[in-house]
Image: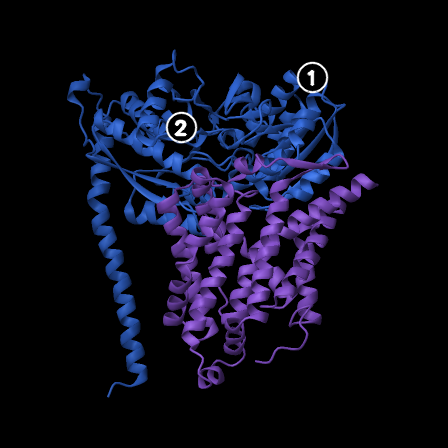
Amino acid sequence: MAGFAISFLISFYVFFLNILMTSLGMAFTYGVTRILNLAQGTFFVLGGYLASVFAWQIGLAFGIAAAAAASLAFGPLFYLYVKALGRTELEQLFATYALLLIGEGLFKLVFGNGDYTTASLADGLGSVEVLGQQVPYSYLWGGAVAAALLALMYLLLARTRAGLYMRAVRDDAEMASALGINVREVGLSASALGILITAASGAASSMWQAFTLGLSGQILVYAFASLVVGGIGDLLGVVAASAVISAVRTAAVFLYPQLELVAIYLVVIAVLLTRPSGLFARHARLA
Amino acid sequence: MVSRRDALKIGASFVVGLGLGAGLASIISGRPSAASQSGTTISLSPPTSSSATQTGQGKEVFKLGVVTFQTGPASIFGVPALNAAQLLVDEINKAGGILGAQIQLVVRDESGGPDKMVAVYKELVQQVGVDAYIGLISSADCLAVAPVAEDIGTTLTVFFDCATKQLVDQGMMKRVAFRTGGTTVTDGVSLAKYVLEVMPDVKTVAGLNQDYAYGHDEWDDFKNALLAMKPDVQIVGELFTPLFTSDYSAQISKILDLAPDLLHTSFWGPDLVNFIKQASARGLFQKVKVAFARGEFGLSQGMPDGQIVEGPDYHAFPDPRAYYVNRDFVNAYQSRFGSAPSYPAYHMANAVLGVKYAIETAAAVENVAWPDLSAVIHAFERLAYPAPGQYIIMAPNHNAMEGAVVGVSKGGDLEKFKFMYPAEVNPPVGVPSTQWIKSL
């Protein structure tokens, strides 16, 4: 029984980390800039590709950090691109979807069709044995990265002047600009941060996941599930939602593996029917 | 003023006129080719005394349509395949082409699904006018294109990779369609035979495969072959995961829990790499031996030693030191693309060489400068020819009797590999695969 519990817990934690990593950046970007980014996966995959390339030259930890830093340049470009092409949410969906396709083409050009991962380097971190089960340190380090990113976002939004501006712009951009906030500058820096977080998550995920062509679209499935369940743009909601989805999926695989994907969608549908603004939204969202 | 009714009339007559014009144009433009065809057939009937007096027109350019994945995760198969096609076409052209005709490649991407592949097939055959079509990695794409190819019936159509057994079991390749590779039955039976050779005492087996037709077929064929040859084997778990899953932690936990002697998987692409990485981090390979139906791509991605891997082709077989067809292919491929050819490159070579040899054989048999389609089909149905990976033997069911290489992983390569002979791992022509597997 203890063996079963521990293998359930390990699987639960690992998949929780997986979903959290894919959805964190998206939640932040939408929560602050109100841009629903379909090209989220592109930046996630970019982080993974870059980390895999850098890590072989400068080591795992520096590689991941370098990948995140390199992605910083893409944030402002992304913001300008979206603002130039799409004013309404529908236009933004089209613009970011186009970016997803463009990204795939560029990845093929630059990285080719191989599998990119830092897993072999992460193997060197070793693993710890818990009740006869091996738990690789890479997942624990991944958890630390996720926790650090969450803390960073929370402190920024809740405790700093820049965060105050970001929340003001999100709630009412017109009023914020009337009060003297430079909306464009806030948007630029918020997007840069969102992309940074996304790429950092992708870079950290390269410790257990291979990056290859066509992945940018695939990872959206779980990211969207967690965003819908948690309430779009709600950071703590996304954490809780990732836990719920991971628990449901892990239980499904253990008890009735045929229902793996269906179980996740059932949770999403149930949440949409009963609490359309998300399980953990504190108040119904206006407009 | 033009009334609405007039406008409609004008519009309608314009459309009708356009249709008539197009019809006439096609009849007129169709004539010369029809005439030249009948010309060749007539010239055939009086038996010419010597081949020196061959009549009929040779071809200058041979348009070859090639369709494989160039984008998406399956490009890991499609890119090596297209590489091989380009390599072979260049070499054939340098050596004078097919009967003097220079091959011109017309390449399309396989991404987009079965409906799109049907549209691409029609475009290549009816608009571009390719002389032969080679393509398709995805089974679903083959199953959609095969009936359309037979329906149109004008173009030699060779499926080079898609492993679905339905094409054979349902008799879907009737006239113009051929496949120069094996099926999931070839994979499953080869793997099962090898497993029983190296682990004769295997008791418990589990499966972890992708949840779509290919994953289910690979598992069923392996499982049924194994059970037919060793009925006391126990199947302790059958797991299926969605395509392109990034995390297998729950499945790995479950397999560790089941602790089978052997795990079978036909994972490919990112799934294969993710599984190998995550499973070795969790110590799965120390407890369970794994048989990979598509493991070749995992060899360079940290696959632990001692795992069972099926090719179906492998660059070290037949031994390049002795077998020059393979040696030349491996050397040319390696110097041009920087790595050894993987099995899709071998499958593409089977197809390109098959088209070339079928046409050349038909021309020699019929004693014409350029054979017509039915002569090529007739020749292809019983053709046997050397390809880099193995000697390809075509059967009257339009499918190759292909063998498979199975071996054990060792330091990023395969060792102790064994070639499973075609007759051992393919049902005889006309026998349904399920029935044949039961009789093993």
Residue A224 visible, this orientation: no
Estimate the x, y position of residue B373 in percent, counting from the top left.
32, 33
Estimate the x, y position of residue A129 in percent, counting from the top left.
71, 36
Q: Colour of chain A?
A: purple
- Classify the position of the C terminus of chain B by image quarter: top right
Q: Quadrant of residue B241?
A: top right
Chain seen in blue: B
Q: Is residue B209 above or below residue A47?
A: above
Residue B341 is marked as: 2
Frontmost residue, A153 versus B434? A153
Residue A167 is marked as: none
Residue type at tag 1: Pro
Estimate the x, y position of residue B180 in percent, counting from the top left.
43, 29
Q: Secondary structure at mark 2?
A: loop
The Cα–Cα distance between marks 2 and 1, rounded to whole angstroms, is 32 Å
Label 2 is found on which chain of the structure?
A: B
Residue farthest along the right direction in this orientation: A1
Report the side of B26 relative to B301 (left or right). left
Residue A51 visible, this orientation: yes
Q: Which residue is mark 1?
A: B200
Question: For mark 1, does the 10 Å Cα neighbourhood hold few (<14), some (14 to 19), or many (20 or more) residues?
Answer: few
